Image: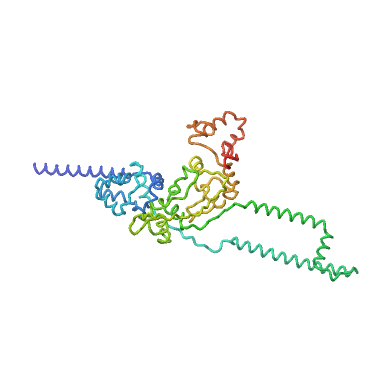
Amino acid sequence: MKILKSFISQRFKSLALAAIALLSFTYNIHAQEGDVAAGEVLFKANCASCHFPHKDMTGPALKGARERWIENSTEENFYSWVKNSQSVVKSGDSYANSLFAEWGKSVMTPQAVNDQQIDDIFAYVEDFVEPVEEVLVSDGPTGSTQEESTMIYWILATLLLIVIGAVGMARGNLSKALKAQNGEVINDNETWGQGVRSWAWANRGWVGVGTLLIVIVLLVIGMLDLMKIGVFEDYKPEQPIAYSHELHAGDLGIDCKYCHNAVTKSKHATIPTTNVCMNCHKTVNEGTTTGTEEIAKIYEAAGWDPEVKAYTGVTKPVKWVKVHNLPDHVYFNHSQHVEVGGIDCAQCHGDMKKETVARVMTTEDLNAVEENKIKFTRPTLTMGWCIECHRQSSVDVAGSHIDGSTEENDTYYGVIHQRLLKDKKTYQGILEDDMITVAELGGLECAKCHY
C-alpha cells in the first residue's frame, strides 16, 4: 500500500510539474506575441538610433535579447530594462550590471513604451532578415551622357555652317558665270564685305524679316537665362565632414527628425548639434568606408578624447555649408508644413536614403519618389515650385471631411470648412472638385510668404 501511495504521489508531482511547465511555456509564448508591422514603426522611432536587430551598434544587437534575459535574469526584468535600464541596474541584478559594464556604462534612454509595445518591437526584431545587397550588372552603355550630346550638337552645327559656306561660294561663282555670259560687268576687285552689302540691299525685305526674328530669339534666350538667376538645382557643396545620409537614414534607418529635431517646432529644421552625433559616436569610432578619419573630426568638434572616453572642454565647431538657401524676403516655416500640413521630408528634399551629403534635388529627383503626391514642373526652391505645391495640396484636419462633418469643428480649418458650406454660391468653384487646396484658402496671397 505504501508503495502504491508513493507511486501515486510521484505521478501527481510529475503531472503538477508538467502542468506548471506547460503554463509557463504558454505564458512565454503569449508574452512574445506581437505585431510585426507595429513593431517596425516603434523600432524605427525608439530603437534604430542605437540598435540594429542583427548586429551590434551603439548598443547590442536586439535579436535574441529576450531569451538572454530569461536565461540570465527574468522576463520581468527584461521589460523593466527596456523601460528604464537604470532601475534594474540599481536593483542589483547581476546580468543588468554586467551589460551596463560591458557597454561602457552608457546609460540607455528610458523608453515610454508598455509591455505590448515591447512585444511588438521584439516581434519585428525576431522577424527581421538582413537584406541582401543586389549587384546590378550592366549589359553595356545605356545612352549618351549630357556632355556627349552637347558635343554632337556642336559638331552638327559646325558641319551645317561649312555646308552653308560651301553652298554660298558655289552660288557666288555661278552668279559670276551667269553675269559673264550675259555680258554684264564683273568687278573682280569687290571685297567679300562689299558683296554681302550688295546682296543684303538687293534682298532687303528678307534681310529685315530675318534680322527681326534673330532679335526676338536673342531676347527670348536672354529672358530664359535671367529666369535661371537664383536657381540652384543639383547644388551639392563639399562639407567639412563626409557625412552620409545613405548610411544613417538608409542603412541604419535613423529617422530624419532624430537629427533635425527642431523641424516640428521651429521655422528652421536646424543643423544637428554635435551632441546628437555623440549619442552614437561615443562608442562608434570607426566608419564603414572612411575608418576613423571623419569621426575624428566629430570628436574634435565635441572636445571628446576617445582614449580616455571623456570630454576635454576644448571644442572646435563644425563649419557646415548651407545647402538650401532662400532669399531674405521669403518666409518659410518647417513646423507649419511638417507638423500642421503633415508633409513628409521627401516631398521637398527627395529620397535622402540614397544620398551622401545634402544637395538641392532637381524636379526629376522629387517626382521620382513614389510617395510624393505632388508632381513638379518648375525648378526646386523657386516661387513657381511653391505655387505648384499650394495649388495641388489639399487642406484637411484629423476627422474633417468635405461635407463639413468633423470631429474637430473648433479647429482652424474645421471652421473654414463650415464657412465654405454656408455660402456655396460664393465658393462653388472651391467645392465643386471635392477638394479644398492651400491656394483656395489664401495660400497664393503675397503676404503669406513674403515680408
The quadrant the C terminus occupies is: top right
Which residue ends up furthest to the bottom in the rendered image?
188
Q: Nearer the viewer, residue 2 or 190?
A: 190
Report if residue 172 is visible in the image. Answer: yes
Residue 216 placement (x, y as % from top left): 73, 53
- Which residue is found at the position 80% from the left and 56% from the top? 208
* Residue lying furthest right: 183
On screen, residue 426 above or below 383: above
Image quarter hosting the N terminus: top left
Depth check: give the residue in front, 329 or 173: 329
Say whether residue 55 is visible.
no
Q: Is residue 13 above or below residue 160?
A: above
Q: Which residue is pictured at 74% across the width and 55% down the height?
A: 215
Q: Which of the 4 image quarters holds residue 177?
A: bottom right
**The one of 161 and 19 positioned closer to us in this rendering:** 161
The vertical placement of 194 against 28, above or below, is below
* Side of 184 relative to 302 (left or right): right
Left or right of 154 in this view: 251 = left
